Amino acid sequence: MPDAVKTSRAGDGLSLLSSLISNINSKQTPKRSFFSNLHFELAPGLTISIKGYQILHRQKPQRTYPIWMGGEKPMLAHPEAVRVDSEARTVDKSEIMKAWKFGGEFICFKPEEAAALREFGSKVLRLIGFKPRSMLPSWASVKKSVFIYPSEELFVGSTRVFSALWQKLLKDDKIGIAWFIPRVNSQPQIVAIIPSENPDEEGAATPYLPAGLWLYPLPFADDVRKVDASAPPKKADELATKMREIVGNLQLPKGIYNPLKYPNPALQWHYRVLQAMALEDEVPDENDKEDLTIPKYRQIAKRVGGYMAEWKELLEEKTKAFIKSRALKREAEDEDGGRPVAKRARTVPTIKEGSVSGSKTGNAKLKEMFENGTLKNMTVADLKDVLTSKGVSATGKKGQLLEKLEQWIEQNLY
C-alpha cells in the first residue's frame, strides 16, 4: 500500500510538472473582461445583462516596473512629474484648468464642466435595428471586436434571451446595429452585433473562436477615407490567368487562417529565455529560435514550382514583346520627325571619318553601334545632340555622356 501511495504521488508530481511546463510553453494569456454586467437593451422593457471580453489582442512582452540601467547595477525607477510656471514655482493641481481654443481665444472649463462635456449617458448596449449581413463591407473594420457573453447576475433569464437572439441572427443571416458605451465617460460607438458559428460544426468559418456574439465597431464618416473607385476594371490577360493557378494551389488548410498556429517568434523566444531562467536551465542559443512564420519553400516549390516556371517564361515573352514594340514606336517617331528635338544655337560640327551625325541617328543605328562598340567614335557634340533629342541630360565629359547614352539604349531598345 505505501508503495502504491508513493507511486501515485510520484505520478501526480510528474503530471503536475509536465502540466506546468505545458502551460509555460503554451503562452496563453488570461482573457480579462472588458466590462462586466452591462445592460443590453433589446427593446423597451426588455433588458438583459452581459459581459465583454477582448479575446483578439496583440501579445507582447510587458515590463511591470521601469528599470534604470544607468548605474553599476539595474535599479527600479520611481518616476514623478512636477509642473512649474515661468518663475520655477510648483503649480498646484487646483490651479490647473483645461481650455480649448475657439475663434482665436481660449475658453477655460472647470473640472466638473470638462467632465460634463464627455457625458453621453450611462453605460449601455442598446439595440437599434437589424441589417442583412451582406451590407457590412470588409473595409468597415477599424478596431478589434469585443466578444460578449450573457450574465445571470442582474437579470434572470439573460442566457435564454441571448441564445435566442444568437440563433435568430444566424438563421436569417443578419446583424444587429447598436449604440454602445462600454464604460463611464467613454466615447459612444455604433457597433454591429455579429454572430459567430459553433466551432464544432462542419464548415465553421472561425473554428478557433468561440460561438456567440461579437461587437464589431463601425467607422464614423471621419474615419473613412474617400477613394475614387470609378476606374474601369482591367481585363484579365494570360499572366493573370496563369497566376490564378498559382494562388489556387497555395491555399491554407480549408482556406482558413488560424492565428494560433503562427505565434510571434520574438515573443516565443522571450518566453523561452524566461522559462530557462525560472527553471535554472541553460539559456538556449539564439540560432535555435523557432519561427513558424517562415514560408515552407519546399512545399511551395512542390505544389506550384512548374506553374511558376511557366509564368516566368510567359512574363519574359510579354516583356520582350512590349520593349520591342516600344522601340519600334520610338524609331518610327524619330524617322517621321514626330519627336521634337531641342533647338540650340550652335555651329555645325565637323564629322570625323567613321562617325555619325547626332540628331539624324535612328534607334536602329544606335543599337547597331552599341553592339559593335563604335559609339566611342562619336564626337562630344554628337553625343550631346543625341542625348538632348532623347530627353536625357547632356552635361558632363565624353565618358559620362557615353555612359548615359549606353544606359538609355539598354533601358529603351532591349
Image (spheres, rainbow, N blue to C red):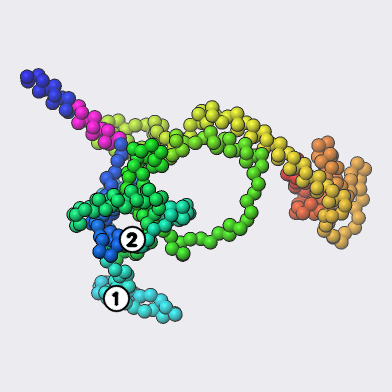
Q: Which residues are magenta?
A: 14-25
Circle number at residue 113? 1
Who's the residue at 80% across and 47% down the image? 329
Distance from disc 1 to disc 2, alpha carbons, whole Å, reads 30 Å
Q: Amino acid at mark 1?
A: Glu
User: Which class describes the residues within 10 Å of circle 1: few (<14), some (14-19), or many (20+)?
Assistant: few
Who's the residue at 36% across and 62% down the image? 128
Quick one: 350 or 32, which is closer to the camera? 32
Q: Which residue is mark 2?
A: 127
Query: Do the residues under discs 1 and 2 have CB atoms within 8 angstroms?
Result: no
Q: Amino acid at mark 2?
A: Leu
Is residue 18 shown in magenta?
Answer: yes
402 left or right of 31 in image: right
- The correct choice, above or below, for 221 with respect to 198 in the image is below
From the top left corner, tell me how far across and down residue 311 is, in percent. Answer: 63, 35
24 left or right of 201 in image: left
Residue 239 visible in this rendered orientation of the protein: yes
Is residue 160 shown in magenta?
Answer: no
From the top left corner, tell me how far across and down residue 168 is, in percent. Answer: 34, 51
Who's the residue at 13% across and 24% down the image? 8
Quick one: 78 or 151, which is closer to the camera? 151
